[in-house]
Image (spheres, grey):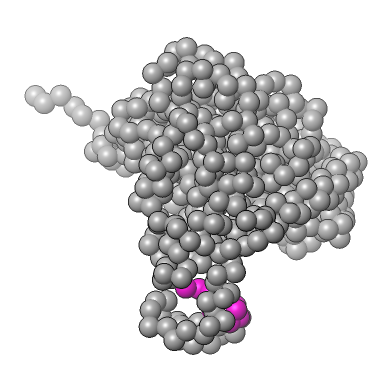
Amino acid sequence: MSQLETPLFDVLLKHRNRHPIQFHIPGHKKGQGMDPAFREFVGDNVLSIDLINIAPLDDLHSPKGAIKEAQDLAAEAFGADHTFFSVQGTSGAIMTMILSVVGPGDKILVPRNVHKSTMSAIVLSGAIPIFIAPEVDKEYGIAHGISVESVEKALKTFPDAKAMLVINPTYFGFATDLKRIVDMVHEHNIPVIVDEAHGVHIKFHDELPLSAMQAGADMAATSVHKLGGSMTGSSVLNVREGLVSVNRVQSVLSMLTTTSTSYPLLASLDCARRQLAVHGYDLIDECLRLAKDARKRINKIPHLKVAGREILHSSATYDMDPTKILISVKDLGITGHQAEEWLRNNANIEVELSDLYNILCLITLGDTKKEINLLVNALQRMSQEYELKAAVTETIVNVPDIPALAMTPRDAFYASTEVMPLDESAGYICAEFIMVYPPGIPIFIPGEIITEDNIEYIKMNVEAGLPVQGPEDLTLKTIRVIKERMPII
Ligand SMILES: Cc1ncc(COP(=O)(O)O)c(C=O)c1O
């Protein structure tokens, strides 16, 4: 089959054009049984392919027909031996990777700045995480990837590890020297699995960092929906044969996946793969051109600064994706969250994320010169508005230390717990996840010892209006900790 074809989308269209009389779910039956306002809004086309795994349409849980053909074409496009489609986002693909390679008591090497789906899978699997500290950027207040040197140290200390997870590239677009990490970890016969949520496009242009499959990794969870043009919630899991069992990956994915798999999502993956394979280079080339122009112009705006190649100085910051525009606003005397709100209220612009010091804007296949001009223009106006504040403010970047792990996340998750005031909780073992989403990187995970500086960091984020998520108490006045056991007298 050629990359020009879309076998799954074609089968859905063929089926729809036969106008079969449906006595199966979904009960809306091509939209006829649906709320008219919603039906009219989304249109009959998408509703007519909102179908279920009847024989002509194949079954994601055991693909033999059109889904298999679509997955095989995707594998060829991504340079993988096998590709599995996910309708549960990259989170579903990450959980599948982890549950396929580790079980209870197995050690897995992971960067501490993992997405919450990695920690969820670690709790579910009962594996023991061995955390590797990511390189921290004190200028921008962000975490990068892990260095080759720290992986080397981790392998020496824990040669019995069963797997290694790498995030590459990071949310902010920075890439580690993945090829060296893969080669080194493979010398120990340990599989390397990659959270490639922010890198679906990197395989398709030679000016971008190496993709997980190009670097020889064993598996990669790759968000097609984030930057590759498919619909939200669709993603792929790419697999290389050798150190992992493809059959086990298929059965774990099936365990974690709904039996009612969305065909519009699957078809959008099929078509996004065609677009990337056939036109990816040219489309990404245009993105890179727009991004370079945006970077140059934003860097000329007083008090704003875009993170670029000048911050690449180690094996953890080895390469970068220039389409991620990370703009530091701290010299304007405002937080990233304030900048996000200013852009929303004054320019109708929505950014990808904000944190205490930065905003992140993504230039993708969907952008043109017009959007870049609007962004640059709005940033110029924002800079002028805060000019006076910028002159008198000096912002110190606060990046808290990584808390120590006192017990496995799974033991902590299932332990007896109690609720106590956040302010008094330093020294106790945390029993819940607390993170700022996006980016969804935990400040605390179950099993970690609560520290004063991390309590302070949580408060700074809450005060700045950033979305601190995870705890039962959404006001964050209290926190759930492991119950202290007093001696029985
Ligand atoms: C680094 C990283 N990994 C995984 C994910 C999960 O991806 P998804 O939202 O497709 O489940 C995200 C989402 O933001 C992410 O930033």
Judge from the rendering whether residue 365 lies leftward or rightward of residue 295; answer left or right.
left
Look at the image and say whether residue 44 sits in the magenta stretch. yes
Q: Main secondary structure of the magenta part?
A: helix
Q: Which segment did they paint magenta?
A: 41-51
Q: Quadrant of residue 16?
A: bottom right
Q: Please, is residue 110 above or below residue 82 in the view? A: above
Looking at the picture, how far across and down is residue 36, in whole percent?
Answer: 53, 87
Extreme residue toward the top, this view: 156
Q: Can residue 132 be seen at all in this image of the molecule?
A: yes
In the displayed structure image, the side of residue 331 where residue 187 appears, left or right: left
Position of residue 223 in the picture relative to residue 205 (left or right): left
Residue lying at 71% horizontally and 26% vertically, measured from the top left: 318
Q: Residue furthest front?
A: 1
Dividing the image into 4 quarters, which one contains the N terminus?
bottom right
Residue 285, percent across and down?
A: 82, 47
Quadrant showing the C terminus: top left
* Residue 399 sits in quarter: top right
Q: Position of residue 136 (x, y in %)?
A: 63, 26
Magenta residue check for 95: no
Picture layout, residue 116 above or below residue 448: below
Task: Note whether residue 433 is visible.
Answer: no
Q: Of 460 and 327, which appears nearest the observer?
A: 327
- Residue shown at 74%/51% (left/top)? 280
